[in-house]
Image (cartoon, coloured by chain):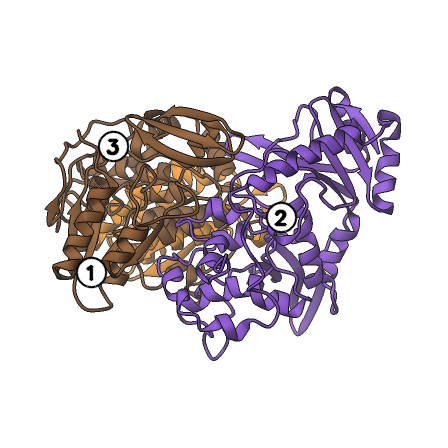
Chain colours: A brown, B orange, C purple
Amino acid sequence: MQKITCESLIEKACELIENGTVSRVIGWKKGEFDYDLTPAVFANADEIKKNFIYNDFSGANFSKYLIKETRKGEGKVLVFLKPCDTYSFNQLLTEHRFDREKVYAVGIPCEGMADIAKVKAAVGDGILKITSEGDELIVENLYGDVNKVKLADVLAERCVNCKSKKHTAYDELMGEDGEILDNNRFDEVEKLENMTEDERFAFWQNELSRCIRCNACRDVCPACTCEKCVFDNPKSGVENKAIADSFEEKMFHIIRAFHVAGRCTDCGECSRVCPQNIPLHLLNRKFIKDINTFYGEYQAGEVEGSRAPLVNYTEEDIEPNDAVKREE
Amino acid sequence: MQINNEFKPKIVAFCCNWCSYAGADLAGNNRLAYPECVNIIRVPCSCRVNPIFILRAFQRGADGVIICGCHPGDCHYTSGNYYTRRRMALLFSMLNYLGIEKERIRLEWVSAAEGAKFAATMNEFTEAVTALGENKRLEDLRCKK
Amino acid sequence: MRKCSLNSLNAVFEKLANDSALYMPVDGDKGADYKKWEMGDELSSALNTNRSAKDFFFPQTENLMEFKVSGKEIEVIDTRDEKEDFVVFGVRACDAKSFDILDTVFLSEPCDSYYANRREHATIVTLACTRPSETCFCNVFGIDATKPTGDVTCWKTADDMYFEANNEKGKAFIEKIADLTEECDSKAVEEQQAKTKEILKKLPLADLKTEKFGKDKTAEFFDAPEWRELSTSCLGCGTCTYVCPTCQCYDIKDYDTGHGVIRFRCWDSCMYSEFTKMAHGNNRLSQLERFRQRFMHKLVYYPTNNDGVFGCVGCGRCLAKCPISMNIVKVMKALGGNDGE
């Protein structure tokens, strides 16, 4: 498949803004380095030509920004959606979180995004320049070395286990659409399930104890769209700003994952942004896996308007006491 | 709580107003004994039980939590307990995934006519939790005396 | 100056750990973090630990006092634990400088006795940098990465570890490990410093300018139109504030334990919607205002109150950790910090 180029996206964005289809463009803005791109709203073609960038680090999922962006200003917003982003997009539409009429969605193919931490682990720190050549990244550093690393070896976790290259929503598609993929995203979950209770407890205690309660996982999550989070509401009785006891980290992470259960599209943003590198996707995927097992295969965001498993039921549903294997 | 070296658990039982709470009432009327460590919290429907309530109960010192509601199909609000069933299936499974002892949390359907079942369930559940001992994995150290 | 070979470094650590708790950055599978040293732990070569070294003096949560209520009696219990001496080894120049900034806040009158207690009992042993990252810009704030401050400064070369005391506390430290180290000249250290300085000049952020910011610039930047665009994609999470070695805001809250009340303080973030919420409501209602507060504090408010010293040490953690890659460098450049070159 032809890799989509930054130039073609800039051209498309300029064309749509100049012919009046859209008034603003949500895109990635150049950073200080080749990997620190910031989501930005561009209002004219000059800005786009100057600062718009699309490369192997354009990982940020823009769907959630549509809630805020469609509430202001006149005209439509152009948004570029990678296949996985379209799932979040659809899910937000299903929940009526933004006005579809105010969005012009352009689907773009994606071959997976690189994780800068993995790049640094592979070739070291002090990176000055990263360029893409074929399936390789060429990394130049401060010390005059030029290293090559295969994109496939430094892909973000969510891209290694990519669930779909197929766009589930768009107004216009650039390039070719892909297929829903077979993947191994539940392998890690299964590994944990097969551990003993004590081992699982030790694993999560170790992971969750590193949480600093920055709330980045919640704030970036396209499924976490409450206007006021229960953990920010002093009247809720569970509001807390910091982990004062190891109980609170468990409370926060169980409830965070539970609140998006059945609605989480497994976009992987939570794990991407965690400053403490906690594998938060393993909580979300446990719910997804259980939902698939108990209530039949369900992929949030695949079909707009689909009924989420937790607001649905059948008379034959599994009993909670049986949901956990009683023998071990 | 530990008195005379004998562990007495704290049990929180969320009972729906229409079936299970009436079931508890019936158990009392029939002089059926169940452990005094069971603290009943009446809720309008079992689906009122937010997962946060359950975790809060553990935080505040519960050693076991049991949710009781009308039998599937008998919900006073038609379908509330069906939603409970799905939510709790996922929550129980998640707690177990995090390494929390699965015997600490249970769901039972108890109708208004099942006073005997209510008492038997509470006896059995209390016994199971007593065997497990104190809740250590979902405790909040600040709330311990 | 004294030195020991890297082979005998473990013996030095062992000696120190026998005397008092010894903390240092140790590599884990998720990056380096400070850890209490135990036999077998190796000093990490990482530049930044995930969490900054401020945790030692300003922990994320801390109980201040407890209240026990019985009838009409209220008993107030002081819960602070009298700290014992401890050593923090391998602090980088940026984090070492952050202690000065925190000291200004916590040790000026009225002095924060909780903070002061920990500060008094700590010996800070710093480690000079040799392989800076592209995200490093401590030089911009006048910090010398080749000669960090602290009670003792260390330089690690290919074969040896060099020690130099900077004050009385440092001398006591050197005294403690005297029989494991030998007196030496500073030639190897100077060579290393010269080499590192060449690299520091080449850092991509080395040319960042601070002149436009600082004391009494509030009026100039408060209403700058750039804030809108800069803050537009800010998620309002607390990552930047919590990984920052100089962010020092906290909240004090009461927690009802069911048998008493614990008054504790915990980190707070100006990025949060609940930050400094008062009876009348909140004084910064939009993310733009909250975003502006953080950067104005680092670049203008703090210098205004503290003789022009900036509230940033250029450690680069926010550059690496921000979910949307927005950071103080981008803010400074967008506000025209580097214009007119």
Residue A111 numbered tag? 3
Q: Secondary structure at mark 3?
A: loop
Residue C242 in percent (x, y) is at: 53, 52
Left or right: where B79 falls relative to B123: left
Q: Secondary structure at mark 2?
A: helix
Q: Chain of mark 2?
A: C
How crowded pointer 2 is (Cα within 10 Å; few <14, some 14-19, many 20+) is rated as many
Indicate the amino acid at tag 1: Phe
The residue wearing badge 1 is A98
Q: Are the residues tagged 2 and 3 within 8 Å (C-beta)?
A: no
Residue C139 numbered tag? 2
Indicate the amino acid at tag 3: Glu
Q: Relative to C7, does residue C156 appear above or below in the rendering?
A: below
Q: Nearer the viewer, residue A275 or B140?
A: A275
Indicate the amino acid at tag 2: Asn
Residue B5 numbered tag? none
- Which of label 1 and label 3 is nearer to you? 3
Label 2, label 1: how many angstroms apart (C-alpha)? 46 Å
The outermost residue toward the top is: C7
Q: Are the residues tagged 2 and 1 within 8 Å (C-beta)?
A: no
Image point 20% across, 27% down: which residue? A182
Label 1, label 3: how many angstroms apart (C-alpha)? 28 Å
Q: Nearer the viewer, residue A300 or B40?
A: A300
Q: Nearer the viewer, residue C263 or A40?
A: A40
Residue A177 in percent (x, y) is at: 13, 36
Label 2, label 3: how many angstroms apart (C-alpha)? 39 Å
Q: Relative to A256, does residue C227 appear above or below in the rendering?
A: below
Q: Chain of mark 3?
A: A
Left or right: where B13 falls relative to A62: right
Q: Relative to A72, does residue A56 appear above or below in the rendering?
A: above
